[in-house]
Amino acid sequence: MRILVLGGDGYCGWATALHLSQRGHDVGILDSLIRRDWDRQLKIASLTPICGIERRIARWHELTGHSIDLYVADMCNHEALETAMVRFAPDAVVHFGEQRSAPYSMIGRKEAVFTQVNNVVGTLNLLYVIHEKLPDCHLVKLGTMGEYGTPNIDIEEGYLTITHKGRTDTLLYPKQPGSYYHLSKVHDSHNIHFACRIWGLRATDLNQGVVYGVHTPETTMDRTLVNRLDYDGIFGTVLNRFCIQAAIGHPLTVYGRGGQCRGFLDIRDTVRCVELALLNPAKAGEFRVLNQFTEQFTVNDLAQKVRQAGTEMGLDVEIENVPNPRVEKEEHYYHAANTKLLELGLKPHCLSQSLLDSLLNVAIDYKDRVDENMIPPRVSWRSCAPVFQ
Ligand code: NAD
Ligand code: USQ
């Protein structure tokens, strides 16, 4: 297949592009590289030193003989996106190219507006390019489990059958997201659903949970290929943050009471899930939704697991309940369906002692690169004034 990976310089996109290339697909990467600008602006950095995209791609070619075409373009620039898409002529696009941090989107008005414009306009431009130029192209879009929020009923995969006043229909599952970022994903989902209905596009929305880990077989082939690993209070996600905190002796930052429950998956399963969606495409006119996570944990569960693994490695790991900077339920019901990717053949990597050991070892290897000032949460959901410079 010819597959264009949008956002292919990022955490999930880079690992996915290499995985698909290694499996023999013709892969292209389109990325505006804006994520590297945000790192500079916010004075944050990946724990692992990441090489420039051209160098990464050149090294991949030297090691494997596989070429990856690169398009440096902003998806919000319709002409640039269309030119790249038409030139590459993909059978499928995998769309990771968005501003993906909930805290970033809650810094203030400017960042909320930017997040929604970047994500919603980029996706709309993509829908028009597919409709007008490549109508058979399968869109695999990264959504998020956070679109559903934390309702007091089971979460289904995209749709809910409702009987109301004696009549029954199957409708998009109700959404109660927890940040302007998560809302941008809801808006995307509605726009894609609409495009499938009116133009007959084929799309898969992968409602992904929180991803953890850093290594995949391809990104460990050489240091030039290493993936990014965020630990700061804006882009770092909870389990990756906890492992890095444990490695440097910083108390694990459990927000509030820590009963917040989410779906999680290993980055090795991210790349496999995307591949499974590509190999089993949605039908023309179908808006297919797959919940992409393998296990559910509370924040407290994760903190306990990291403390146990860290203690066995001789680390002194403390857990601290810090005031929750977010507005979210801290104790709640959570039970989400995730059978469709298993039915397509996913064999999950469950969260194991060996994965935690490997993540803790990566954190220990690079601990001299950690800036402790970047660890505390710096964005408040309640305050309108930005709480950091
Ligand atoms: P990331 O920030 O590491 O990568 C995103 C990439 O997209 C960056 O390289 C960035 O430069 C690029 N990008 C952003 N806006 C763009 C635009 N307008 N045009 C072109 N390129 C653009 O993020 P990630 O962690 O790899 O996440 C990728 C996708 O997966 C996101 O859509 C995110 O919402 C989703 N997701 C991530 C996680 C997670 O835990 N990391 C979980 C669920 C869903
Ligand atoms: N949390 C802590 N301590 C921390 C960091 C986070 O207790 O140090 C808590 C948060 O309050 C939240 C939970 O952990 O309850 C998850 O937070 P997170 O930062 O790991 O993840 P989130 O903000 O939800 O966003 C991440 C990705 C996003 C993706 C989402 C999937 O950044 O792109 O969409 O995970 S999901 O959560 O399923 O929506």
Image: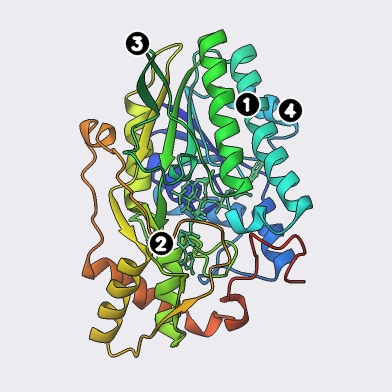
Judged by depth in the image, the label closer to the viewer, 1 or 3, is: 3
Query: Who's the residue at 34% across and 39% down the image?
Result: 153
| Residue 141 seen | yes
Query: Who's the residue at 70% across and 59% down the image?
Result: 107
Tell me if mark 4 has few (under 14), some (14-19) or many (20+) residues whose alpha carbon lies within 10 angstroms of its own.
some
Where does label 1 land, which residue? Answer: 126
Q: Which mark is residue 166?
A: 3
Task: Report helix, strand or loop for mark 4.
Answer: helix
Query: Who's the residue at 23% across and 56% down the image?
Result: 350
In the displayed orientation, state which residue is furthest to the front: 165
**Horizontal side of residue 168 vs 196, given as left or right:** left
Pick whichever of labels 4 and 3 is earlier in the sequence.
4
Q: Which mark is residue 214?
A: 2
Task: Report helix, strand or loop for mark 3.
Answer: loop
Tell me if mark 1 has few (under 14), some (14-19) or many (20+) residues whose alpha carbon lies within 10 angstroms of its own.
many
Q: Which mark is residue 78?
A: 4
Judged by depth in the image, the label closer to the viewer, 4 or 3, is: 3
Which amino acid type corresponds to the residue marked 4 in the rendered image?
A: His
Q: CA distance from mark 4 to mark 1?
A: 8 Å
